[in-house]
Image (cartoon, helix red, strand yellow):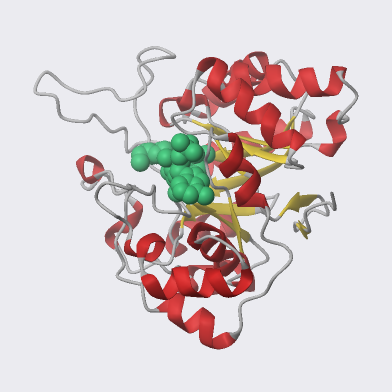
Amino acid sequence: MSSVPTVKLNNGYEIPVLGLGTYKALGGEVEKAVKDAIDANYRHIDTAYLYGNEAEVGNAVRAKIAEKIIKREDMFIVTKLWSNFHEPDKVEYACRLSLKNLNLDYIDLYLIHWPFSFPHISDNDSWPVDGNGVAIVNDDIDILDTYKAMERLVDQGLVRSIGLSNFNSEQITHILNGCKIKPVINQVEFSPSLNQRKLIEFCKERGIAVSAFTPLGRPNPQLKTPAFIYDDSVIEIGRKYNKTSAQVVLRYLIQCGSIPIPKSQTKERIQQNIDVFDFELNSDEMSVLDQFNTGHRIALLPALKHSKYYPFNIEF
Ligand SMILES: NC(=O)C1=CN([C@@H]2O[C@H](COP(=O)(O)OP(=O)(O)OC[C@H]3O[C@@H](n4cnc5c(N)ncnc54)[C@H](OP(=O)(O)O)[C@@H]3O)[C@@H](O)[C@H]2O)C=CC1
Ligand SMILES: O=C1CO[C@H](CO)[C@@H](O)[C@@H]1O
């Protein structure tokens, strides 16, 4: 089994160009998925404090280290600061909670999960709402102040790299204008229906890599959505290379310059999703995939539209 190609980040660390997503994968299932992924040669795992599965992800990684299948330094573990820990003096506390959950000595990449923030009511009140069920935001915390607290985690050796997630171009600029340590990555939703070419170009010019979440658009076999998974033109391209439409899509996203993190807890799909390094789409085939760009966003979080840090009120 050959290793997955890597992308060199702006601080010199390398990240495998494809990773395993874990949102909604819980308990024994996620532990098994991460073990299956490591056996299938994944070395990059994406989790978050919000997902409530850091402990299981860490268990799987440590089990594979104990089996001598991997060493800690072979793995690239990503987790994220949730929005109720944006107060600068809460950031180290949150990071230590994640480290404790993972039961690892350091995190490879720690991301600010979203630019908007919530008040910290308790560690596990992740989506505080008022008496009418309306989201409570805390717009008094400047994302740069949160980011500066993240920088201190690098200085302390708790995390190797820091980055952003769901940040738009203006928010990235705000960070770049005041930071000491450049973010290495902005993790955003990116699939053929939400073609992030402008944001990728913007990030690339500034030395920031882009990882692609919800890369498969969360396929629904009953509804046959998203179209790019079930469309005959994509299935046809797959047939030419003996690949599924999901593999064609992941290949497309990699060739667009992103780092996709498809989630699966099904062994066969985990194996399938990483088996995308023995073919290349030509420019006509890339154009077929480009045609699915409707701008449809799954992670829209409309309840937060009124926050001054909501990222989707400008073009990119
Ligand atoms: N930073 C952020 O705000 C966000 C980050 N993320 C991260 O990105 C990851 C991926 O995104 P996610 O939203 O989970 O969506 P995905 O687009 O990765 O879709 C996941 C779904 O696709 C199914 N699937 C996986 N592989 C295949 C395949 N080859 N063929 C058909 N179906 C398949 C999975 O089923 P099954 O598991 O049953 O195999 C699951 O139901 C998340 O898990 C999370 O780690 C996601 C959203 C937001
Ligand atoms: O990581 C995440 C998983 O998906 C959720 C909803 O679609 C997002 O809100 C969240 O950021």
Residue drawn 29% across and 55% down?
Answer: 224
Viewed as shown, does residue 43 lie left or right of 234?
right
**Looking at the image, which is closer to me, 301 or 158?**
301
Expressed as whole percent of the image width and height from the top left, the position of residue 91 reads: 56, 26
Ligand 2 positioned in quadrant: top left
Residue 26 vs residue 140: left or right? right
The image shows residue 105, relative to residue 16, as above or below, that is: above
Q: Is residue 291 above or below residue 244?
A: below
Between 30 and 147, the residue placed more toward the observer is: 30
Residue 242 falls left or right of residue 125: right
Q: Where 97 falls versus 150 (above or below)? A: above
Q: Is residue 9 above or below residue 109?
A: below
Q: What residue is at 51 percent from the left and 64 percent from the top? A: 249
In the rendering, at what x and y percent does residue 89 appear? 54, 23
Residue, far left: 132
Q: Inspect this view and state whether residue 183 appears.
A: no
Horizontal side of residue 221 vs 258, given as left or right: left
Q: Is residue 157 visible?
A: yes
Name which residue lies at 43% across and 67% down: 192
Q: How many marks?
A: 0
Q: In the image, residue 93 lies at what x, y percent?
A: 59, 18
Viewer-closest of 176 and 74 = 74
Q: Quadrant of the C terminus?
A: bottom left
Q: Who's the residue at 91% across and 24% down the image?
A: 68
Position of residue 264 measured from the top left corner of the image (x, y, whole percent):
53, 38
